[in-house]
Image (cartoon, helix red, strand yellow):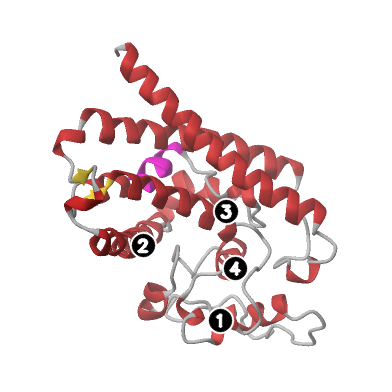
């Protein structure tokens, strides 16, 4: 590789690793140190991950973000002339620019849902996805703790975005920063949305930290990334989701999870 390619790859690695470490470190410090006691009632699982969980997650996360950077080099250095990315917002206007954000959210959520369900096939799960599920009680460090093959599949959304509709180059960058932040929230272990949010017109379609935490704890159901559209349409929303959300967001709750097959999910 030429020096310019190496420099480009190195910059991508530094940028992605820095973004991930920044947001994971901030949220970990805030919720696992500073706000741990006052917000303990919002901890989905009332226990802390182990030091070995943190160490394993950080190691695999560093491998994953390096793979993400390598894909960015492939798409934006070698294949850039063939992508549909553009440089000036004026080429398509602000309305189209904002539309691409909505489009990226939905196409990424759709890609993730079906790729995620595929990885729960027994043969793929034990060889690939199990690494991520070793964290049954996830923390911010779990967000990108993937087997290298899963990391390649996860970042496969990047070329899909770049080679379909025209997307501004900075919109892609900001979008992937957003997905880092949201993925850290999904694995936070604490619920940030307000009480009864999951029952609102908007909230019932939004994937929450409670929803994804249940997926890690129970190993099935709640496969979405940003939304619960596909989970609700395909019957994979967990039956214990509503009750668990209510328990987690109620400071003095007396609600109890049903003992009647609490791990069952619709359609599974």
Q: Earlier in the sequence, mark 1 or mark 4?
A: 1
For mark 4, what is the residue?
Answer: 214
Task: Tell me if mark 1 has few (under 14), some (14-19) or many (20+) residues whose alpha carbon lies within 10 angstroms of its own.
Answer: many
Give the residue at mark 2: 105
Give the spatial CA distance, label 1 vs label 3.
Answer: 19 Å
What's the distance in space between the residues labelled 4 and 3, CA to CA?
15 Å
Q: Nearer the viewer, residue 77 or 224?
A: 77
**In front here: 73 or 4?**
4
Q: What mark, if any, has residue 184 been given in the picture? A: 3
Residue 167's label in the rendered image is none
Earlier along the polypeptide chain: callout 1 or callout 3? Answer: 3
In this rendering, the answer to whether 19 lies above or below 96 is above
For marks 4 and 3, the one nearer the N-term is: 3
Q: Earlier in the sequence, mark 2 or mark 3?
A: 2
Q: Visible in this render: residue 90?
A: yes
Going from N to C along the chain, the mark reached first, 4 or 2, is: 2
Side of 79 relative to 70 (left or right):
left
Estimate the x, y position of residue 49 in percent, counting from the top left: 73, 51
- Which element carries disc 2, helix, strand or loop? helix
Q: How far separated are the C-alphas under marks 4 and 2?
A: 22 Å
Report the magenta residues as a range.
148-156
Q: Are marks 4 and 2 in contact (CB under 8 Å)?
A: no
Prevailing SS of the magenta stretch? helix
- Give the residue pinned by disc 1: 198
């Amino acid at each position: 590789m030429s020096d310019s390619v190496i420099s480009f790859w190195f910059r991508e690695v530094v940028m992605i690793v820095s973004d991930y470490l920044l947001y994971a470190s901030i949220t970990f410090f805030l919720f696992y140190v500073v706000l741990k006691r006052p917000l303990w009632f919002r901890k989905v699982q009332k226990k802390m991950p182990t030091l070995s969980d943190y160490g394993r997650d950080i190691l695999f996360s560093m491998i994953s973000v390096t793979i993400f950077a390598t894909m960015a080099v492939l798409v934006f250095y070698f294949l850039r002339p063939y992508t549909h990315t553009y440089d000036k917002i004026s080429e398509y206007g602000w309305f189209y620019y904002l539309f691409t954000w909505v489009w990226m959210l939905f196409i990424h959520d759709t890609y993730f849902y079906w790729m995620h369900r595929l990885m729960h096939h027994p043969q793929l799960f034990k060889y690939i996805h199990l690494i991520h599920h070793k964290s049954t009680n996830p923390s911010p460090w779990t967000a990108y703790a993937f087997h290298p093959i899963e990391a390649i599949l996860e970042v496969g959304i990047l070329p899909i975005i770049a080679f379909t509709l025209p997307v501004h180059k900075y919109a892609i960058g900001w979008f992937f920063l957003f997905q880092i932040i949201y993925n850290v929230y999904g694995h936070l272990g604490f619920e940030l949305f307000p009480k009864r949010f999951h029952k609102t017109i908007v909230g019932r379609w939004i994937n929450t930290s409670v929803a994804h935490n249940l997926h890690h704890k129970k190993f099935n159901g709640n496969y979405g990334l940003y939304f619960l559209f596909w989970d609700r349409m395909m019957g994979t929303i967990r039956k214990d989701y509503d009750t668990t959300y209510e328990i987690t967001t109620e400071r003095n709750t007396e609600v109890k999870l049903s003992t009647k097959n609490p791990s069952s999910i619709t359609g599974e």
